[in-house]
Image (cartoon, rainbow, N blue to C red):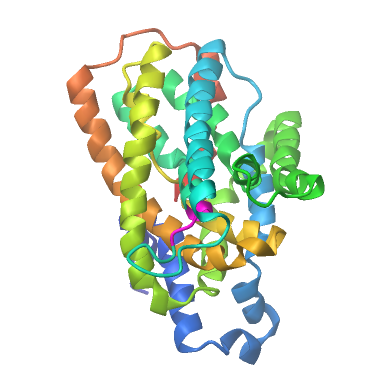
Amino acid sequence: MKQIPIKRAVERVPGGMMVVPLMLGAIIATLAPGTPKFFGSFTGALFTGALTILAVFYVCMGASIDFKATPYIVKKGGTLFAVKIGMGVLAGVVLGRLLGEAPIDGGLFAGISTLAVVAAFNDTNGGLYMALMGQYGKPRDVGAYTIMSLESGPFLTMVTLGVAGLSAFPWQTLVGGILPLVVGMILGNLDRELRDFLARAVPVMIPFFAFALGAGLDLTKVWQAGLLGVGLGVAVVVLTGIPLFFADRLTGGTGVAGVAAASTAGNAAAVPAIIAASNPVYTEAAKHATILVAAAVVVTAILVPLVTAWTARLVGAPADLPDEPAEAEAMAAPTEAKGA
């Protein structure tokens, strides 16, 4: 039988493994909204099971995070992690005072919300970062993502919204938001074979939870939200890229690693739905935020490589420092799928 390169075609789209299934789910939900109820059973579950799939996804993602990290990786990854989250907190505080929990309900910026901005700012596209560092950085810079991958999941977004003075989450919900990731980390570090087994499932689950998320979207709002998403993506690159550049230089880097981290992860589009499920006050904001963040994923996936290449030409090649074997071993290669 003649083979059709479906996977290859999907991956040509920036963030394709997340964006394409999400849009497919939204199209079916818009044109045939009764599909899940009509078929029921497993077919219906594919349309409604996003949170369950995501729970398993975060266990497997956690398993790929190695506790072993050299001082350089801790310093570099910890600094970029702190700055990226810090910019999310700053955006949350400012927008929280202006907007509260609800999205803007009219005008040019209708649909934008504190939730959408914080979710887009808080999570770095790991696959993109590691690919760019493989080209413009050193292996030890790639390994820094071992620390940065702690951004995954809704926990830090919940904390950020609480710090911003918006509706807080009970401690049980906060623990529940990070527990699957922590359990996965413990399992993966106790048993390397179990880590390899679980980590292989990470890229497989991305299109499935993306499809289920898309099945809850209203395509009539996609065009406007998509345009706003372009602006959100540009804001992520500019507003996080500049402080990340200087933070990288302060840790002895050229600034290139900081710019390469100024992106939005594909699975960040799942965070608004999780937040809304945890606290209904964010339900209205989540409807728009999912599309906004998905658009930001695509925009940052296009812009960040261009800006990173320009920065690398501007500052020159990194110092030719020897890379320790332990640093290369500490790199969590399976987490490349995070930004898919």
Depicted 52 relative to depicted 223: above or below:
above
Name the spot of residue 1 as percent of width and height, x first.
37, 74
Magenta-drawn stretch contains 208:
no
In the figure, is residue 106 to the left or right of 164?
left
Residue 205 visible somewhere in the drawing: no
Residue at the image position 22 percent from the left and 18 percent from the top: 315
Farthest residue, direction front? 98
Depicted 331 relative to depicted 11: above or below:
above
**Image-quadrant location for residue 71:** top right
Residue at the image position 64 percent from the left and 80 percent from the top: 44
Name the spot of residue 281 as percent of width and height, x first.
65, 63
Decide whether the magenta segment is chiefly helix, strand or loop: helix
**Image-quadrant location for residue 332:** top right
Name the spot of residue 333 as percent of width and height, x first.
51, 35
Depicted 55 relative to depicted 263: above or below:
below
**Image-quadrant location for residue 55:** bottom right
Name the spot of residue 168 as percent of width and height, x first.
70, 49
Farthest residue, direction right? 172
Residue 256 visible somewhere in the drawing: yes
In the figure, is residue 93 to the left or right of 68?
left
Which residue occupies the foreground of this view, 295 or 8?
A: 295
Residue at the image position 69 percent from the left and 42 percent from the top: 181
The magenta segment is 112-116
